[in-house]
Amino acid sequence: MSRFVLILVAFLPLSLGGASTTNTNQAPFGIKWGHSKEPQTIEGFRYNYGTPKWGAVRYLAESDIYDFQAELVLYYTGQMLRSVVLILGPGGINNVNCTERYKEILSLLNKKYGHYLFQSTEVDSDMSELFYTRVCTPVSVGLKSVTTTWKTPQYQVEAILFGDEDTGEIFIEVDYMRSPRGLDRQDNRLYKML
């Protein structure tokens, strides 16, 4: 009986958190998924460089987003949009506030997509040899990263806290990947094959 209760408690937040107040089927940033020959116009961002044919299109935020510097990258395969990456930082996040800023982003994503499905922390073995006084120092030198994942019928969303070991800058990356279930089944060749 105690084993059953433990399993029930472990999955309870997932079932309760799945019901959010916003439309999780709405495309992030109003982006049009599918084939595209030209870069899209995205509100709040200005085109920087790239084309769907080249495989990636990069945008820069016109102003700080939630006090972060931000850029947006759309990745294409055969001119079909496959994923969207929002990069927050390095402005707005540092060695002092990285965990608080990451928790703020997680809170916003939890409100939109429900409670996250799982969270993993990757720690390099060299971290045990590092002497540090701030909890964000291992992140800034690339010895620690945290990944949090949500899944909806349309998207898989991952928020990743990581650092650049060469520069010591810290970033939060939010990846949006269209799930095969979220694709139009007429366009999903794999679905037809299976």
Image (spheres, helix red, strand yellow):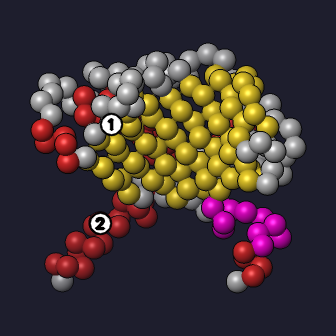
Numbered badge on residue 38: none
Q: Secondary structure at mark 1?
A: loop
Position of 171 relative to 65 (above/below): below
Q: Is residue 43 visible from the viewing direction of this image?
A: no
Note whether 102 is above or below 185 in the view shown: above
Most prominent secondary structure in the magenta stretch?
Answer: loop
Check if residue 180 falls in the magenta segment.
yes
Nearest to the observer: residue 26 or residue 16: 26
Side of 159 relative to 50 (left or right): left
127 or 107: nearer the viewer: 127
The furthest residue to the front:
166
Estimate how packed mark 2 is, as few (under 14), some (14 to 19) or many (20 or more) residues with alpha carbons within 10 Å: few
**CA distance separating discs 2 and 1:** 31 Å
Q: Looking at the image, is 2 positioned above or below residue 131?
A: below
Residue at 65% across / 37% down in the picture?
Answer: 73
Place of residue 126 in the rendered image (x, y in percent of width and height, measured from the top left): 19, 42
Picture coordinates of residue 109 (x, y %)? 49, 42
Front residue (pair 114, 182) = 182
**Disc 1: which residue:** 142
Give the image quarter of residue 106: top left
The residue carrying mark 2 is 10
Is residue 178 covered in magenta? no
Q: Quadrant of the C terminus?
A: bottom right
Q: Residue at x 73, y 63 (%)?
A: 183
Pointer 2 or 1: first along the chain: 2
Residue type pointed to by label 1 = Gly
Q: Residue at x 75, y 33 (%)?
A: 50
Q: Residue at x 24, y 79 (%)?
A: 4
Q: Quadrant of the N terminus?
A: bottom left
Magenta segment, which residues? 179-189
